[in-house]
Amino acid sequence: MSTITEFSIGCSKTINLGNFQSLRIEASVTVSMEPSDDLGKASVAAQDELRQLLEQTYQAQYKLMKSLL
């Protein structure tokens, strides 16, 4: 049986801003695992972190895009 020592999850989303303009945000999280770590718990924690990272990225980029329009 192989042991997972690292995994990555990622997500991207393209948001239509109208007027033929869009905003694309992407984020990924890489998690290093110890042999005693629970993969399920690490996966849930990584997904929570990814959601927060995506929200922060979206807020910052949307604000920037709106100031440029």
Image: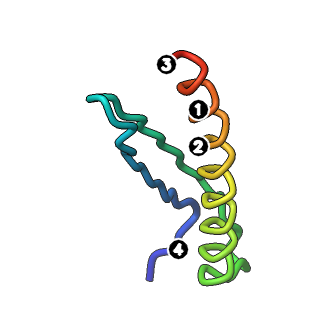
**Disc on the earlier residue, 4 or 3:** 4
Residue on which the image places disc 2: 58
What sort of colour scheme is used for the picture? rainbow
Where is residue 25 drawn, in percent x and y? 47, 40
Tag 1: residue type? Answer: Gln
Q: Nearer the viewer, residue 59 or 3?
A: 59
Query: CA gap, disc 1 to disc 2?
Result: 5 Å
Location of residue 18 by image quarter: top left
Residue on which the image places disc 3: 69
Residue on which the image places disc 4: 3
Mark 2 residue crowding within 10 angstroms, few (<14) / some (14–19) / many (20+): some
Mark 1 residue crowding within 10 angstroms, few (<14) / some (14–19) / many (20+): some
Q: Are marks 1 and 2 in contact (CB under 8 Å)?
A: yes
Front: mark 4 or 2:
2
Give the residue at x 49% y 19%.
Answer: 69
Front: mark 1 or 3:
3
Give the residue at x 54% y 15%.
Answer: 68
Front: mark 2 or 3:
3
Mark 4 residue crowding within 10 angstroms, few (<14) / some (14–19) / many (20+): few
Front: mark 4 or 3:
3
**Disc on the earlier residue, 2 or 3:** 2
**Disc on the earlier residue, 1 or 3:** 1
Residue on which the image places disc 1: 61
Give the residue at x 26% y 29%.
Answer: 20
**Disc on the earlier residue, 4 or 2:** 4
